[in-house]
Image (spheres, coloured by chain):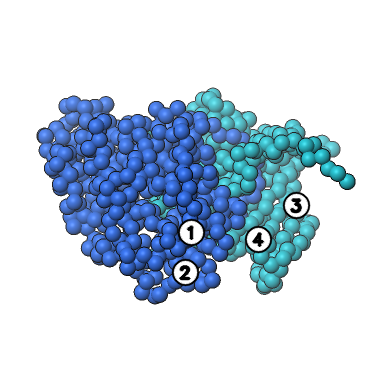
Amino acid sequence: MCDRSKPTNLNHPTMKFVDEYRDATAAQHYATAIAQITTRPWAIMEICGGQTHSIVKFGIDALLPQEITLIHGPGCPVCVTPIELIDQAIAIASLPDVIFCSFGDMLRVPGSHADLLIVKAKGGDIRIVYSPLDVLKIAQTNPTKQIVFFAVGFETTAPATAMLVYQAHQQGIKNLSLLVSHVLVPPAMETILAAPHNQVQGFLAAGHVCTVMGYTEYDAIAQTYHVPIVVTGFEPVDILQGVYLCVKQLEQGQAQVENQYARSVRQSGNHLAQKLMREVFVIVPRQWRGIGEIAQSGLDLRDAYANFDATKRFNLPTTSATEASECISGLILQGVKKPHECSAFGTHCTPEHPLGAPMVSSEGTCAAYYRYRQQPRGMGGLDENKSER
Amino acid sequence: MKINQNVRLSCPIPIQQYPHVLMAHGGGGKLMHQLIEQMFVPTFSNQTLNVRHDAAAIAIHGQNLAFTTDSYVVHPLFFPGGDIGSLAVNGTVNDLAMAGARPLYLSAGFILEEGLPMETLWQVVQSMQQAAKVANVQIVTGDTKVVDRGKGDGIFINTAGIGVLEYPQSIAPQSVQPGDVVLLNGDLGRHGMAIMAIREGLEFETTIASDSAPLADLVLTLLAAGIELHCLRDLTRGGLASALNEIAEAAGVEIAIAEAQIPVHEEVQGACEILGFDPLYVANEGRFVAFVPEKDAKRALAIMRSHASLKAPSDQPTNHACAIGTVTGKAPGIVKMKSKIGAQRIVDMLSGEQLPRIC
């Protein structure tokens, strides 16, 4: 009845870099090409939660031949932040005279006994920020408060955190500290490949992580474990092209690092961002929620910036963190199991009552499966109290 | 007097898992529906309420009326495309319109915060009067309360509205039939992203303006043209996805929509991409879905497209009403969507609030 081949194109030109990568014809073109070159089963892991979200949301896996299995990787920063750190965040955010700043999707992640949204409902001053530099303004305008930033994320967000610390240091800001839980992708890939139950034969590397870091550090992994690694974007056509390049290498017995996401990623990455990260951070071992400690996989503040460390500034209780016993998020994060193989999925564990972090973030595998694959049980509704009203 | 602590004078709280109210309890998603379904509806239960429509249909001395209420707590008070005053009129007018009623009278209850500039109040009141004039309703009663500084957010407004049901047809989820076409009267997400952009200080190349608009005249035009309207729902909090889920659940049907048919303006799409929001869940204040039988769909769409309420202001691109899907059969409340690349997926109701993602 209404033919709208380009729905976002109302009176404006087509959105650059979005519409063309969601094009059904182009997607089908790559799906057909993948089917043509595939001769046997292959298991490919997409590292990033953003890619997982796209795959499930657009149904990209449904376009692939049966032989190709996509394994969802651990690249959801919310999901891998250790529960002990969430508990510390909750303890700090509950203190009077603290303004606790966080990215939005950390707020619903369950700690041992609560989440940050519950702290907010009880009166904690918790603010969602979009950029770490927003925290600097909050610190400047609230000199009598202690401002704490929950610095989570992969190499993608680490430079912005580094910039916050660097500028705060330059400006002599005293009422700011950070709870740092930045993690690094390549050590996690090595951990997955070295695991005895590993099934991953090829990787789609996380495009935005590589925008910052480049992809030279993946050469050694590709060679050592003989796996192709394709730096890949996030839109359906990106992912299908990434899968195509990966399958092509697998079929030919190659194990190279390739760059599908050339419109964003350069081989050596963003030098300024890397320099800033080296200035502020030191590489440390880090706990990954559901996986365990991975050597050389985290970033922490260098000694020169240790006065910004919230764990040193606040007297935090050492809690014994407890994970929900039913939750298999570790196996989900390592790609060993899929969400519907968990007995709690969609029953005891839902986005409203998450047992584990992968059910929380929009990048979490369980949340993506629940939102796009689970049959919903909506409820009827009246019309009260509109937040945008 | 000694009080026996063991004696409970009331029933246990029906929602045990949330000892405190969260923002999501007002967010239009699952928690709000849990609150409504487990606390409000069972407690107040009656035949009229149990229909669960935007407005209650009541009959007094043979006259069929629609009655509704809504509260407005929007921050900021003024935003591109509207303000709390026009929103408070349009929102309640639209709730009446979604029952197929001609809106007639509104009440206005003001909760004002001590220290609010009188100039601000005056602007809001003028805006309300202007919106009431456009929507052809009168504000006939009101109330004023002032709370201590810090205990309000400038202005909160409650409006209630009464309208008259002039057409006999039952416009409600229960009237939805397999084969019905789902019509949407314009592009999605403008109001939510306009508020988000200004509230959070996000700067985009162009300003996103709210779609806030009264919808009653368009609905009455459809009815006057003899369009068989089975169900109407305005897409406020929770967006299109939540509205369709509510209807699918209440009607016991499966609804199938096509992503490629759903209009989302470039600026809104861009803002959503940046924040990790899905336009299907973003709030609107001038958009609704209409469920009509296939025989009437073309004509209804033509009326929607030519109606003056959808003529956008000159600085905004024109919006297009569109058919976005159909009711595919009897099923326990499922909404499916064909993605832009052709795969099927479920469209669930919003869980909690949409929270901006990390990267």
Q: Which residue is mark 1?
A: A315
Q: Which residue lies at the image location 63% right of the left edge and 47% below the top edge?
A: B20
Asked if residue B183 can be seen in this view, the reply is no
Residue under numbered circle 2: A175
- For the point 51% across and 54% down, the residue is A91
Q: Amino acid at mark 2?
A: Asn
Residue A371 found in image quarter: top left
- Front-most of A253 and B203? A253
Circle 4: is it few (<14), some (14-19), or many (20+) Cα within 10 Å?
Answer: many
Quadrant in which the C terminus of chain A appears: bottom right
Q: Residue at x 35, y 45 (%)?
A: A288
Dots 4, 2 in contact, CB < 8 A = no
Mark before the other along the chain sequence, 3 or 4: 4
The amino acid beneath tag 1 is Asn
Image coordinates for residue B265, horizontal then vertical, percent: 43, 52
Are there few (<14), some (14-19), or many (20+) residues within 10 Å of tag 3?
A: some
Q: Are marks 1 and 4 on the same chain?
A: no
All told, the count of numbered labels is 4
